[in-house]
């Protein structure tokens, strides 16, 4: 097995100013050592991981890392910065930077080495020794564990998966015969660093508090399940995770502190204290598809419990399940109009009248199938918002509430309200203690029955009518849009479509436009046209920028640019995400400006669209198609010009960069 780090992979005078420059500087050392085969491809993977969650940790540590097919052997490069580099940590810049590279198919032994290093980073004696060393070979040896960390270090005492922390050792702790016991699960998206650092941090805090802690690290090297006996004996549970906890039903009935993995690293003592408070209150949890819910009315705390984050997750769940119905139904309706004209919407039912040789019959068939699919939009939206909140027991009341929203003409807004109401009602019912003999029928009979009655009452009697009135007001407002009001709405929709390119804001704008197609009006058709036009701009702009000024982009970005032509033309905004992840401060504002221009022009030209998807392939269904394409071209040109200008200014400020970009570094076989 090759050494994880050598002296050649150590830079004790790292001069980079940004985290991306730091990653590039350290990655170049990996390329020179034959550890990375494609510099640009690897950096794109590092940037994508960084976009998921900042990798800065309290204590002046930055750990950019990823799994990549461009890594030939598990590798660590280390840099030390005098001025500090911002990696997003709450306590300020990092002076110790570890770039961790793992092959896409790394074996368990290699990943175990990397996880062991991640644990050692939680030891202040280890990090202090790294700050004090003056020779690269000594630093490399220290990281490899070949030189002893100064006395007092506990880096070698970190628990492995499922291993218990030391028992009570401090005054004021629980009696030795009855220690407080916690089981914990840690996980992060990559499963290389944060997973194991959180485990070590929690274990160290537990030793200081006199608590017995058993940790299950659900990382890239797999995971060893906690013994069921340990879970049964535990007084409380801590989940420090950024991906779904696997097999979480094992922890049902226990007090659970549900938080993000960074909280496990940065504030373990607070999590342990919260676990003790939950146990003292006698709280128990009902583990569902969402966050664990305590039976004392408290939603477990931490990063995952933040209301804004949870609400976004719930809404995205509903929208993501709704989109396939939109695509299938909308494109069928659009195709029917292309074959039979708009009047085909009033044709007789094909069940009563269908002639095999008539084009109009086929057009009517497509229209009626598409209309049937569209009828599910609001119920599916509501049902899966509820599902995201409270798992399968919430599906029935969610769908029922969504169907009622259609019945009372509350539309898209009514579906949102119905889904949130259904999820909240089910979550409330799940907190009620019931006799063990009733638990088996609760999710399949009792909860759907009671929740459907409550949601139905609220939608029909309480909130449905006001929402329906608001929906009518919005519809009337869209129908009356003209002049500056329409242009302003186009700008706002364009900004939303381009801000996160497939993320929550993008989906909200898209869902708003699609909701209007269920009962189309001139105003709602203009909104749909503006939304699709603006959503095409980001990938088209990046494709054009990589074509006209390719030297400003990496090799991988230029390859992505060729694919972005097709993605943009097909109205797939996500085609620009790799560019935004690698350089968000230049790319995102540029494409937002272009999207705003396109949205404004589309509304000003009065373009309308009845298809919810399709890009340039549904241009024949757009009114004034030439002006519509002109709006897209104008926005693309603006975004391209801005991103080229901003990237060109960066290159001017960093004179050595072009040479680094273009030089060929030999890679060992």
Image (spheres, rainbow, N blue to C red):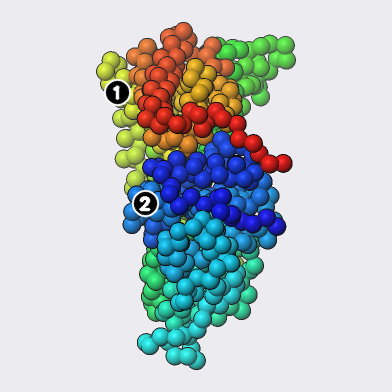
- The quarter of the image holding the N terminus is bottom right
Tell me if residue 456 can be seen: no
Q: Is residue 661 above or below residue 16?
A: above
Q: Label 1 to label 2, Cα distance in Å?
A: 48 Å
Residue 608: numbered disc: none
Q: Is residue 640 left or right of residue 660?
A: left
Tell me if residue 582 can be seen: yes
| Crowding at mark 1 (Cα within 10 Å: few <14, some 14-19, many 20+) | some
Give the mark nearest the N terminus, 1 or 2. 2
Mark 1, secondary structure of its residue: helix
Horizontal and vertical percent position of residue 300: 41, 64
Residue closer to the observer: 467 or 604: 604
Identify the residue shown where x is 49% and y is 42%: 25
| Crowding at mark 2 (Cα within 10 Å: few <14, some 14-19, many 20+) | few
Mark 2, secondary structure of its residue: strand
Residue closer to the observer: 31 or 595: 31
Residue closer to the observer: 280 or 466: 280
Horizontal and vertical percent position of residue 645: 38, 22
Identify the residue shown where x is 39% and y is 71%: 269
Q: Is residue 234 above or below residue 444?
A: below
**Mark 1 touching mark 2, by CB under 8 A?**
no
- The quarter of the image holding the C terminus is top right
Identify the residue shown where x is 41% and y is 76%: 276
Identify the residue shown where x is 56% and y is 26%: 558
Residue 488: numbered disc: 1
Residue located beneath label 2 in the image: 82
Q: Is residue 162 left or right of residue 532?
A: right
Q: Is residue 145 above or below residue 368?
A: below
Query: Residue 642's quadrant in the figure?
Result: top left
Horizontal and vertical percent position of residue 571: 52, 25
**In this rendering, the label closer to the viewer, 1 or 2:** 2
Horizontal and vertical percent position of residue 373: 57, 32
């Amino acid at each position: 097995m090759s050494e994880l780090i050598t002296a050649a992979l150590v830079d004790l005078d790292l001069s980079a100013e940004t985290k991306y420059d730091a990653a590039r500087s350290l990655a170049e050392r990996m390329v020179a050592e034959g550890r990375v085969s494609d510099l640009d491809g690897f950096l794109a993977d590092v940037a994508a991981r960084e976009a998921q969650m900042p990798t800065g940790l309290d204590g002046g540590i930055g750990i950019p890392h990823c799994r990549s097919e461009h890594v030939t052997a598990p590798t660590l490069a280390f840099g030390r910065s005098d001025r500090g580099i911002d990696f997003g940590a709450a306590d300020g810049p990092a002076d110790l930077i570890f770039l961790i590279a793992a092959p896409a198919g790394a074996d368990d032994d290699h990943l175990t080495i990397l996880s062991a290093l991640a644990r050692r980073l939680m030891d202040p004696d280890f990090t202090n020794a790294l700050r004090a060393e003056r020779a690269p070979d000594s630093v490399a040896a220290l990281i490899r564990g070949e030189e002893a960390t100064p006395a007092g270090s506990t880096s070698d005492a970190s628990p492995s998966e499922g291993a218990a922390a030391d028992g009570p050792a401090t005054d004021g702790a629980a009696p030795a015969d009855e220690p407080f016991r916690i089981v914990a699960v840690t996980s992060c998206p990559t499963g290389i660093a944060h997973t194991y650092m959180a485990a070590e941090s929690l274990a160290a805090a537990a030793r200081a508090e006199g608590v017995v802690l058993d940790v299950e690290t659900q990382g890239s090297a797999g995971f060893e399940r906690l013994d069921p006996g340990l879970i049964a004996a535990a007084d409380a549970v801590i989940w420090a995770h950024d991906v779904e906890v696997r097999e979480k039903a094992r922890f049902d009935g226990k007090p659970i502190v549900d938080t993000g993995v960074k909280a496990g690293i940065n504030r373990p003592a607070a999590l342990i204290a919260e676990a003790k408070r939950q146990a003292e209150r006698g709280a128990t949890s009902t583990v569902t598809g969402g966050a664990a819910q305590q039976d004392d009315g408290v939603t477990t705390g931490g990063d995952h419990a933040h209301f804004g984050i949870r609400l976004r997750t719930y809404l995205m769940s509903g929208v993501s399940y709704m989109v396939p119905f939109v695509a299938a139904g909308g494109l069928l309706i659009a195709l029917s109009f292309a074959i039979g004209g708009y009047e085909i919407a009033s044709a007789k039912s094909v069940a009563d009248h269908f002639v095999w040789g008539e084009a109009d019959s086929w057009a009517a068939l497509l229209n009626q199938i598409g209309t049937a699919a569209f009828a599910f939009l609001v119920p599916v939206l509501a049902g899966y918002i509820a599902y995201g909140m409270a798992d399968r027991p919430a599906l029935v009341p969610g769908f029922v509430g969504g169907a009622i929203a259609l019945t009372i003409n509350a539309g898209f807004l009514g579906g949102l309200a119905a889904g949130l109401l259904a999820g909240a009602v089910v979550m409330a019912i799940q907190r009620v203690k019931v006799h063990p003999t009733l638990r088996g029928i609760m999710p399949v009979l009792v909860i759907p029955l009671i929740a459907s009655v409550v949601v139905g009452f609220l939608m029909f009697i309480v909130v449905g009518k006001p929402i329906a009135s608001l929906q009518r007001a919005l519809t009337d407002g869209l129908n009356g849009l003209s002049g500056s009001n329409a242009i302003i709405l186009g700008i706002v929709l364009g900004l939303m479509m381009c801000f996160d390119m497939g993320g929550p804001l993008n989906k909200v704008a898209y869902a708003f436009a699609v909701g209007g197609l269920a009962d189309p009006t001139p105003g709602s058709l203009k909104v749909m046209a503006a939304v699709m036009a603006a959503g095409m701009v980001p990938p088209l702009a990046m494709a054009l920028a990589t074509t006209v000024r390719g030297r400003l982009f990496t090799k991988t970005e230029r390859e992505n640019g060729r694919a972005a032509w097709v993605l943009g033309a097909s109205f797939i905004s996500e085609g620009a995400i790799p560019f935004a992840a690698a350089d968000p401060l230049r790319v995102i504002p540029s494409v937002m400006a272009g999207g705003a221009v396109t949205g404004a022009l589309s509304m000003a030209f009065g373009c309308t669209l009845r298809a919810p998807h399709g890009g340039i392939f549904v241009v024949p269904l757009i009114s004034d198609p030439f002006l519509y394409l002109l709006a897209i071209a104008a926005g693309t040109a603006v975004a391209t010009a801005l991103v080229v200008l901003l990237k060109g200014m960066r290159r001017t400020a960093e004179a050595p960069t072009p040479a680094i970009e273009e030089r060929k570094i030999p890679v060992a076989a």
